[in-house]
Image: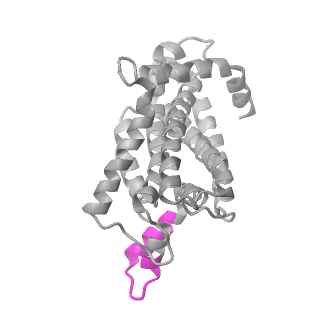
Amino acid sequence: MKHGLNNLFRHRVVIQSLVTRELKARYRGSVGGYLWSFLNPLLLLLVYTIVFTTVFTPPRAQGADTDPYPLFMFCGLLPWAWFAASLTDASNSLIAGGNLIKKLIFPAEILPVVSVLANGVHYLLGLPIYLCFWIVYKPDGIGVHLLWLPLVILTQLILSLGLGLGLAALAVHFRDIRDILANTLTLWFFLTPIIYSRQFIRNMAEAEGASWVPKVVSQALDLNPMTHIMNGYHLSIFEGTLINWKRLPVTLGVAFLILMAGYWFFDRLRDSFPEEV
């Protein structure tokens, strides 16, 4: 693991160049160019605002502040888009970059790392749009607890890198991974408190006469690392309160373990990549 981190640090200029190339390629031939990095989250936020203020009634829970709901949902939707796109792109990164990994001097782990970082840049570009709307709708909501946001982002980054490395290595040998991942991410999305609050499911599970389904879902949410990452976003940005120190540090530790396991698995299969891609 230490060797892998040192290797990435030595090739930081290559990583930076590939991330820049990835960002340029995404909007190549587009009139708006990088402007779409700001327009896409803005338009998406406007669409959800219209839908959840005129068409659907959002799920609410006693003791959970989800107003204004479009901003509550978008607080989790933006980082989820980063997470889902990172895993999807990383799983296909070695196959798409086959010409590069066949060169002995090129470390293959750079490709999934670039996928995660490039999508992370898109998230950071869209974040100011969200914060601007938040200042307009609830100016007293932004406070000193926003300083905890980098820790939440770091936790998600480490988790995404670990899963991305493992999926990239696995996808080289099993090309069905991309399709399986797409369906898994859909289920994972609904098992993560993004369109509903964590308190909403907890209230359902603790309600008198509740069936076993909300209780199982509530337990699954507690085991889901993205639950605690999303809770970190909601607390540090949306609610402006102290993040849960009993949950996020454990999630950060789990993310490190996943990163170590992902890199170990990637390193074990490294020699087979040139033959399989």
Residue at the image point whose x is 40% and y is 72% from the top: 60
Give x and y (percent) for residue 148.
67, 53
Q: Quadrant of the N terminus?
A: top right
What's the magenta region? 203-221
* Viewer-proximal residue among 126 and 199: 126
The answer, for residue 168, to whether it is visible in the render is yes
Q: Quadrant of the C terminus?
A: top left
The answer, for residue 177, to whether it is visible in the render is no
Figure check: 21 above or below 268: above
Seen as rendered, the residue at the extreme bottom is: 208
Give x and y (percent) for residue 8.
67, 26
- In the picture, measured across the screen, residue 64 lies left or right of residue 251, that is left
Where residue 40 sits, quadrant-wise, is top left
The verdict on residue 211 being magenta is: yes
Where residue 36 sits, quadrant-wise, is top left
The verdict on residue 75 being magenta is: no
Figure check: 60 above or below 24: below
Give x and y (percent) for residue 245.
69, 63
**What kind of secondary structure does the magenta stretch mostly adopt?**
helix
Give x and y (percent) for residue 4.
69, 29
Residue at the image point whose x is 46% and y is 78% from the top: 62
Seen as rendered, the residue at the extreme left is: 55
